[in-house]
Each structure stands twice: as structure tokens, then as C-alpha cells.
Amino acid sequence: MRLLEFDYFEPRNLEDAVTKVREFDGNYQIIAGGTDLLTALKQRLSAPAGLVSLDHISSLKDIWEEDDVITIGAMCTLEDVLSSSLIAEKLPALNQAAWDVGSPLLRPLATIGGNICLNTRCRFYNQSSFWRSSRDTCYKAGGNICHVTNKRDSCVATFSADIPPVLIAHGARVRLAGPKGVRTLPLEQFYTADGRFPHVIMAGSGEILQEIEVPLPAPQVSCVYHKFRMRESIDFPVLGVAVMLKLGEKKSGKYCEDACLVITGAEPAPVEAVQAREELLHRRLEPGLLARVAEIAASEIHPIKTSLISPRYKREIAKIIVTDALKKAGGIEE
Ligand SMILES: Cc1cc2nc3c(=O)[nH]c(=O)nc-3n(C[C@H](O)[C@H](O)[C@H](O)COP(=O)(O)OP(=O)(O)OC[C@H]3O[C@@H](n4cnc5c(N)ncnc54)[C@H](O)[C@@H]3O)c2cc1C
Ligand code: SF4
């Protein structure tokens, strides 16, 4: 599969990158590590006039701690995340999620920014143009039919990135640079829940993800990421869950002071299981509670059959991985 022709730019600073993006008036793509984008371009899923690479902007490649916030530049590779002693010590769940992405060959190229900005996936979309030509062009690819729902103007493609659930569970914010200046917003607000344009940048804001700010977790906070995939060696998640627990101690045992459960691989955006959190709050962690919470979390996702895996199977997997993640985060022995 060959790439179509495009203009290629390598700005040396963020201001020049934002200017270049504005000049293209929507007909461009940002390229970071290219591990997802280049396949999409070869499959003719888009045909931008220009590619704006962030690879030569050194200010986007640092990880540092200041005022109880860990900041990670969008162009840090997953290998950078894995080799950071700061992240290993203070955000071990992020370390785990980075380890779970792809394979050792992918992680030195793949960036954390590219993972956060990852496009949604669907078995009718992530195919070559030859494969797709056997049926009408679907809505996400520019047509007016969805082969999953049969609706004309909506897309339910699935969000499957591993890193965002952990960042959301930690209360991370993203800093975006664009034509109207710089703004920060909670990561969960970055996502639109629209399978065709899954985040504000794809929805046309003209912005660039600059960095991610993660508040330093309190000492009583424990966060884990659990992923289930078909091939252990390399695969997107069938489902992944990040569980953050803030634990208190009473005579009767550990109890939950605060919690956040975020699931990827189920819907067009990461899903926060808010009812499961409610069930956990202020309760003692015991096996009956964890099983109940996992049941509730599984009922809060609404998977749609955008892959060969059935929604029912995903719900069963959710119960298992949420229970396991709760046990691990809660320090509960098997
Ligand atoms: C074989 C294989 C296996 C994979 N397995 C997994 C997996 O298990 N889990 C997983 O989560 N992913 C997986 N991926 C997807 C992908 O490799 C990773 O998500 C990776 O982190 C994407 O980062 P990148 O830098 O390569 O992004 P790119 O491919 O460069 O970009 C991805 C998207 O993000 C946009 N973008 C990138 N950076 C920015 C920015 N700073 N500002 C604005 N927009 C930006 C691009 O325009 C593009 O739309 C896999 C890919 C392959 C090829
Ligand atoms: S969910 Fe429908 S519109 Fe979206 S990619 Fe799949 S077939 Fe296309």
C-alpha cells in the first residue's frame, strides 16, 4: 500500500506548528509517531493536503514534576514513559498502561499524545480501500450509512486507547495550543463520544495537544490498569479498566474514601462507571462488595458490535477485569 502525495512540514516550535495548521484550513493532519496515522493514510481513510510533524519540537518531549503536578509532553514516547523513574514511582498504573500498548517495536515510536488523540476503530472502517469498496462508503469514511447501526448520520466506532483511562482516573488535564491561544481542560472533556470525530481536535478545533498534567496522587491512593486482549503479545484492548482507590483504614478493615473507574474498548469514548463508584464510596472493601461493584460497572457500559467480539462477551469480561483491578488496587489477597 502506497501513500498519496502530501506536503510535509517539520516546525521547530509549537507556535509555528499552530500557524501551519491554521494555513491548511482543516485539510491537514498532525503526525506524531505515525504508528496509527500512517496505516490510516495507506488505507486511504483520509487524504490530507499536508502533514505537520511534531517530531522536531523538543519542548514537547519532557517529563517533570513541579508544584505537585507531573507534566508529560505530548511527544514523549511510550518508551520514555516506561523509562521515567518519576512515573514508575509516582504513577505506576501509567507505566503499566504504556507497557500494555502494542509491542516493544512500537513503543519507541508511539507517543503518549498520539495515544490520547487516537482515532476510534471499527471493523468496517479500519480496512483497505479495496476491502471497503465492496459496500457503500460508511459515514465515518465520508458516506451516509453506518453498517453497524444502519443509521445515516451517526458513528459508534470504538475508542480503544490504553492510556487515557489511567489519566482520567488520576484527574489529568490536557493543555491544548491553538489559534485562540492555550487552554487546559479535564481529559474526560476532551472526548466527544462521537465515533466519527472522537475528540475536540478531530472535531475541528485546529488545536495541538501540548502536554498532559497529572496531579500527584495522595499517599493513600492506589491506581491500577487491567487490560484484556485476544493476543497477549500485541493487541488493542477488548476491554481495559483503570481503577483508582483512595483508601482509609478503620478497625473493621480498609474502606473506600474515594474511587474512579474508567473503561476503554466499550464505546466511542472512555466510560466512567459512576454508579459503580457510588456503590464503593465509604464502604469496607470485602469480596461481596467488589463483585457487586463489578456487576454494576459491567451494566454501565454499552458496547456495540464494531468488532468480531459480542457486546455480551465484553460485559462478562468487564466483570472479571473490574473485580481483578479492584482487588489489586485494594490490596486484597486472592
Ligand atoms: C500493531 C499495532 C498495535 C497497536 N496496539 C495498540 C494497543 O495495544 N493499545 C493502544 O492504545 N494503541 C495501540 N496501537 C495504536 C498506536 O500505535 C498507539 O495508540 C500510539 O500511542 C499512537 O501514537 P503515535 O504517536 O504513533 O500517533 P500517530 O499515529 O502519529 O497519531 C495518531 C492520531 O493522533 C493525532 N495526534 C498525534 N499527536 C497529536 C498531538 N500532539 N496533537 C494533536 N493530534 C495529535 C494524529 O493526527 C492522529 O490522528 C497499535 C498500533 C499498531 C500499528
Ligand atoms: S460504526 Fe458505522 S459509521 Fe462508524 S466506522 Fe463503523 S460502519 Fe462506519
Image (tube, helix red, strand yellow):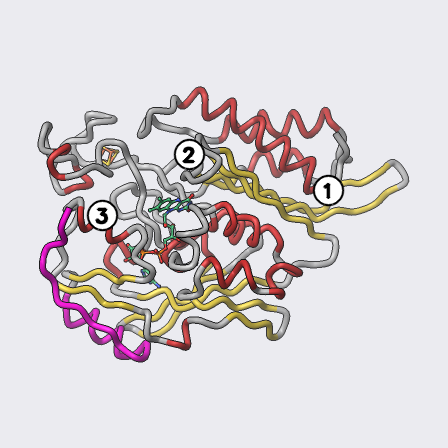
Q: Residue at x 53, y 29 (%)?
A: 318
Q: Is mark 3 within 8 Å of ligand 1?
A: yes
Q: Are marks 3 and 1 in contact (CB under 8 Å)?
A: no
Relative to 138, 38 lies left or right: right
Q: Which residue position is annotated with label 2?
A: 266
Taking the magenta stretch, the answer to whether it contains residue 196 is: no
Task: Check disc 3 and report its element: helix, strand or loop.
Answer: helix
Sequence-earlier tag: 3 or 1? 3
Identified at 10% across, 28% down, the residue is 134
Ligand 2 visible in quadrant: top left
| Residue for badge 3 | 40
**Which residues lie in the magenta part?**
1-25
At a point 59% along the width and 72% down the height, the residue shown is: 65
Residue 88 location (% of width, % of height): 62, 59
Q: Amino acid at mark 2?
A: Ala
10 Å neighbourhood of mark 2: few (<14), some, or many (≥20)? Answer: many
